Image (cartoon, rainbow, N blue to C red):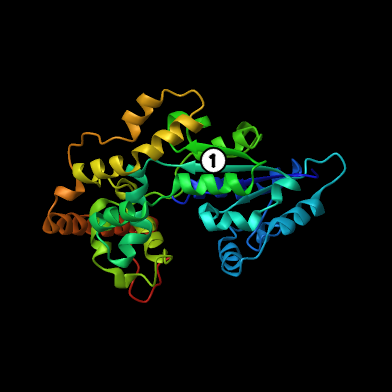
Amino acid sequence: MTGRIIIHAGFAKCGSSSIQAALFHNFARLQKDGVSLFGKELKIAHTPADLGVPLWFLEAAREKGEPLAQKLTDEIASKRVPNGNGIGILSAENLARPDMAPLFAGLDRQLEVSVIFYVRPQLEWIPSAWKQWGLKRGMSLSDFVSHCIQIHRPPFKLSIETWRSVLPAAKVHVRFLIPELLTGGNPAQDFFHLAGLPPNNYDIAKEPRNPSLDFSVLHVLSKNPHLFSGVHDNKLMKGLMRALPEKFQSTNIQMLSREEEARIEESFRDENLWLLNTYGNGIDVNRIYRTYFMPQEAEARYSSMTDLDLIYRCLGIILESVAASSDQVASGDGRPPTASEPES
């Protein structure tokens, strides 16, 4: 073994943005500590301009069936210095796809490999994935739930087992995106700790990187898929995040109906118990499962609201946001911009 690689293989919607943001933010300090980051072209990043998540490079390699083990080994070898750690970190959420794992066959014979997965209760993952992908297609949350159950998405166990079979000598870690089970209560600090990087030595933000939007705004967006050029178009979402007051940057309600929660729990029960028992490291599996993986009581649910209620709430949020924006402009120089003045 001539070096070590840590592969953060997802899953999507399981804290990847927070982990990647912390890695990029601490790039210079990590370099000093002998830790290299793989950038957008799956090459070791030498400057901040080289940083990026190699999602599309990996997708292209997957489509071509291009082996990547030797490329990663050569990149890490190129950065080794006498008495150095020779550690490389590759983070990309699409690595969780089961058909990505074969591209790395043999890597564990050349490097010391750790593969880290973060998984999330499906009761949280499915609404989050709907917000990211489903609503942009005009799909209702109810239909998206049925679709996920039908195709068994997310495929946590399948992906983890595939990676284990492809890299039998690798150390596989599965972490649960549940604050009480994470070091520091958030995925970024937990990842640094797991990688052997003391979190206190680095500047790691504790706020979530992907806040949501109020449920009524999400509902209206799902009725207007033409506003998105595709499922990866995030321009509108980012604009809304900038425009809406912070109190509207969370769903603010239980999104799933009680019946949907029960269907999800039943569909993923065996898999979740297997995950908890296999990777829970001494946790109280029964308590954790009851608390986070089973339906819970809720005062209000998105599924019980009418279209009219949701539209009126969304309209109220928009009006309040416009008023708040006008107040900010007025407090800046005492007057709103004229028609000929661009807003900053």
In the rendered image, the quadrant that contains the C terminus is: bottom left
Residue drawn at (44%, 28%) of the image? 180
Residue 331 versus residue 119 in the image, above or below: below
Left or right of residue 272: residue 112: right
| Count of number-bearing discs | 1
The amino acid beneath tag 1 is Ala
Residue drawn at (19%, 59%) of the image? 315
Residue 38 versus residue 167 in the image, above or below: below
Residue drawn at (50%, 42%) of the image? 118
Residue 235 versus residue 256 in the image, above or below: below
**Outermost right residue:** 82
Q: Is residue 120 visible?
A: yes
In the rendered image, the quadrant that contains the N terminus is: top right
Q: Is residue 46 visible?
A: no
Query: Who is closer to the viewer here, 172 or 249?
Result: 172
Residue 80, percent from left and from top: 82, 48
Residue 238, percent from left and from top: 41, 60
Query: Who is closer to the viewer here, 51 or 170?
Result: 170
Residue drawn at (37%, 60%) of the image? 133
**Outermost bottom residue:** 340
In the rendered image, which residue does mark 1 sit on? 188
Residue 126, percent from left and from top: 34, 50
Query: Who is closer to the viewer here, 313 or 3?
Result: 3
Residue 277, percent from left and from top: 45, 30
Element type at mark 1: helix
